[in-house]
Image (cartoon, helix red, strand yellow):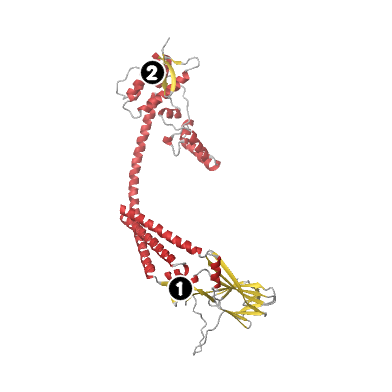
Amino acid sequence: MYKTISIHLQGTPFQIEEGAYEILRNYLDRLKRVLHNQKGSEEIVQDVELRMAELFTKQLQPSKKVIEQAMVEEVLAILGNPEIFGDDEATTEKESYSSPEATIEKRLFRDEENAILGGVCAGFANYMNWDVTFIRAIYVLLIIFGGFGFPLYIVLWIITPKAKTSFEKLQMKGKPVNLESMKSEIENAADRIQKKSKAWSSKLQEEQGIQTGIKKIIRVFSVFFGLGALLLGTTFFITAIVFLFGDPDFIPAQINGEFMSLGDFGTLILESPTDSDYLMWGIIFTASSVIGLLWLTGIRAIFSFKSSIIRYSSLSLIFMMVVGIILLSLTGAKTGRAFAINGEIERDLFTIDTTVLNLKFEQATGVDKQGFKTVSRGDRGVIKVANDRIYLHGVKIEYRKSMDSIFHVKQYFTANGRDHQKAILKAKHIDFKTDLIGKTVHASTFYTFPIQDKLRDQKVKLIVEVPQNGQVKVNGKIVYPFLEDELDTKVEENSHAYVHGDGEYDSW
């Protein structure tokens, strides 16, 4: 009868005879003494215990559940002498083990030490004992031509364990898992690390030289960039000073005989003086923040200047920009509401019983003593403001079929407002001069409305209803329904036209 002891080898429980346990413990104690000054000693002991557990599990059978001394001696003979990890010149115990043939069970692991991505190909190369380049070439072909190479690699990357310990690395390569092979694997790993360290050190020195050159080039570009930012900021600053405080008259539109300034034009668009103030402060805040950020960026780029003052100044300017954008957005939203609703009105002007209707948009305005007559109206440009009224030019014409045998001429006005009632009221305020003299309709090329109505997309259109076989002439030329070209051939004309401020007629 033998006394048994319960033990655990890396989480695997075993029952072992007391004498066999003493031999096993003595072996492990010797191994720990030899490894106590070596790096990775704990990992080596864990790998040895894992190998022991694997060999003991194979030896045990349903009829034999206790580890005996002979079984321990056989396992230790497979593992080898612990003193193999010691110095070659050190004194070792005389006990030795002769390693019998042991069954080698290969396992598939990922080899991350020789990996490009996840070590799947390197692991397959070790398992198959093939060249890793051949395995990688197969995967590349599967990716290019098979279409499933990449997802297959990802799946294998996920399900294939990584060879972490020397025990697993030996299993991956199909080498005997004993102390001698473990020592060889550790030494090889150390050699690989040393070679990689030397290569990395050499590469690092080369890269430092390249980085020094790159840094110099970047520095040159940084200086030029900083100078450009300073120049751009200064240009914006001068422009802002001129436009915000000088308020020059540069808009090609007349107000009391002069060109308009940006402020003057704003009064024709914005609803109230408060909106003008919001717009002005929004522009000041936004422009100042942009200019300040350009200057700070230029200073930092040229002088590589880093300071808490720069950081806090940048944050303050960004906050100012946000406030400016909010003010501009509020002004834009309020002004946009003034254009929200369109109002349209129509009024009958003339009923003319004729076969040819003449439209005349140019009128002489008198003859001086020298015989000259003025044919220009002096209203060219974007808009004109005089005597508290806004003048716009350009009149649309729409031709329609008459429901009877006579011409009908109608007036059609449109304007926008924040509600329909205000839009209609602004449309009614439009003043467009028309007159009927004989069979000729005289019409101005411009129209006007009160300055307090603001610019709200006011437009004027003449609607001409043409009877069957009727014709319309503009300045003596047939424009509807037929237009004579240079070869005196008749071409069907479109039903829309536009008369510019100078009387020029376009149709489509």
Look at the image and tell me in which quarter the N terminus lies. Answer: top left
- Figure label count: 2
- Rendering quarter of residue 409: bottom right
Which is nearer the eye, 494 or 166?
A: 494
Disc 2 marks which amino acid? Leu
Q: Label 2's element?
A: helix
Look at the image and tell me in which quarter the C terminus lies. Answer: bottom right
- Rendering quarter of residue 354: bottom right
Question: Where is residue 155 drawn, in percent x and y?
Answer: 51, 36
Q: Residues within 10 Å of mark 2 (few under 14, many from 20)?
A: some
Question: Where is residue 250 drawn, in percent x and y?
Answer: 42, 72
Name the disc covering residue 24, or none: 2
From this viewpoint, is residue 70 visible? yes
Q: Residue furthest front?
A: 421
Question: Does 67 sit above or below residue 349?
Answer: above
Name the disc covering residue 407, or none: none
Question: Where is residue 390 drawn, in percent x and y?
Answer: 49, 74
Give the residue pinned by disc 1.
Answer: 252
Which is nearer the eye, 48 or 279?
A: 279
**Distance from Cα at disc 1 to Cα at disc 2:** 104 Å
Question: Does 78 sit above or below residue 198?
Answer: above
Which is nearer the eye, 215 or 257?
A: 257
From this viewpoint, is residue 307 visible? no
- Rendering quarter of residue 18: top left
